[in-house]
Image: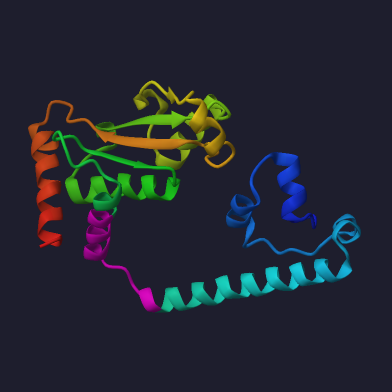
Amino acid sequence: MRKNGHSYTYISQKTGVSKSTLSGWLSAIPYIPNKMTIERIGKARAASAEWKAKRKIESFEKAGEEAKNEIGEITKRDLFMLGIGIYIGEGTKTNDSIRIINADPKIIRFAVKWFEQACGLSRKNFSLRLHLYPDNNTKRCIKFWSNSSGIPMSQFQKTYIDIRKDKKMFKRGKLLYGTAHLSIRSNGKKEFGVFLARKINAWIGEVLK
């Protein structure tokens, strides 16, 4: 609908998704108001919205170019330290368990690679549990996370559906695929159990000294 020139207001009315959420999702999509939009909001407002959308896309492109130049070549140590940083923010640090929770498939996919490369785990050491809401399609979400993470569906735990009324409306339409809880199982190897959890916490301790 955005590509076809519809405003955030129109799309929000049709989908039930808030305009602020739509702005975050669709900000990088070129926007040229269609005839219906111009008739609804007026030519001046439509032109202003188109100009703002164009400026925003140009800003994203400039930021992307600068970021690429500033980051440069990424080393193995860069990836190792980034993984620790992600675990500091998104990982479980108590009860000697190992888990990263996130709604971004890129974060989960990176975490899988990090555990494999930094910790020596194999794909069989992972399990995934989804935290969904009533408006999520469970089968579609499981397939999505399996494809994006590379973890077989056979290693998924029972999906949790959050039916709390106060959470249902707040999260409605915002998390299309819910939240993934990526956990590690030792499969009988002590070095991948409690010891690894303590080692990760020790890495974090060294970084935060």
As for residue 188 lying within the magenta part, the answer is no
Q: How is the image coloured?
A: rainbow
Q: Position of residue 124 (x, y in %)?
A: 27, 31
The quarter of the picture where the C terminus appears is bottom left
Which is nearer the eye, 160 or 128?
A: 160
Which is nearer the eye, 79 or 31?
A: 31
| Residue at the limit of the structure toward the top, as seen here | 158
Question: Which residue is located at x 76 percent, y 56 percent?
Answer: 7
Q: Position of residue 37 (x, y in %)?
A: 85, 57
Q: Quadrant of residue 185?
A: top left
Identify the magenta region: 70-85
Establish if 206 lies above or below 52.
above
Q: Quadrant of residue 40?
A: bottom right
Question: Which residue is located at x 88 percent, y 61 percent?
Answer: 38
As for residue 71 lying within the magenta part, the answer is yes
Magenta region, main secondary structure: helix
Establish if 157 lies above or below 108.
above
Question: Which residue is located at x 25 percent, y 45 percent?
Answer: 116
